[in-house]
Image: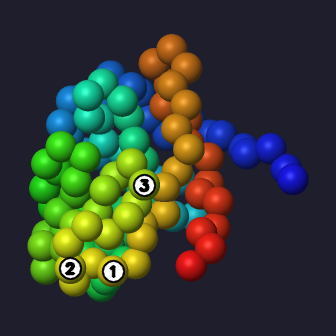
Amino acid sequence: MSAQKFSRVASAAEIEEGCMKCVPVGESEAVLARVGGTIHAFEAICTHQLAYLEEGELVGHEVFCPLHNGSFDIRTGAPVKRPAARALKIYAVKVEGDDVLLAEPVPSAD
Ligand code: FES
């Protein structure tokens, strides 16, 4: 089993409480969101169709898709409200000083 490789994607100061920010990571993009002081990271595009979740709404730990209003739990990626049915990939997050680092998500079993 190989160690996860983390790379810097943003400054922690840029991610305000209750807000989302899309950042490039590797060949794809992730959304950073800070809730209760903790930064979470999840894949940027809805698993239902093509919509950028950063353009949706964050309510507590739930992100609502701007296209059909499906939602996901940003801690686990689990779909909460239909038509979202497939989980989002979740990135491992590390904060070192003011640097936010992400590791590529581990492929899910589904
Ligand atoms: S594209 Fe996100 S719920 Fe349909």
Q: Seen in the image, is 6 located left or right of residue 15? A: right
Task: Provide the residue designation for mark 2.
Answer: 82
**Please, what is the three-letter code of the amino acid marked with disc 2?**
Arg
Indicate the position of residue 71 as horizontal and vertical percent values. Answer: 22, 67
Can you tell me whether the CB of the residue at mark 3 lies under 8 Å from the nearest atom of ligand 1? no
Q: Which residue is mark 3?
A: 76
Element under label 3?
loop
Dot 1 and dot 3 residues touching (CB under 8 Å): no
Q: Quadrant of residue 32?
A: top left
How far across and how far down the image is residue 77, in percent? 40, 60
Badge 3 or badge 2: first in the primary sequence: 3
* SS of the residue under disc 1: loop
Residue topped by disc 1:
85
Tell me which residue sits at (62%, 40%) in the image.
Answer: 7
Which residue is nearer to you in this view: 71 or 25? 71
Secondary structure found at label 2 = loop
Q: Residue at x 55, y 20 (%)?
A: 96
| Residue 73 in which image quadrant | bottom left
Is the residue marked 1 within 8 Å of ligand 1, measured from its CB? Answer: no
Mark 3 and mark 2: Cα distance apart in space: 16 Å
| Horizontal arrangement in the rendering, residue 68 relative to residue 102 (left or right) | left
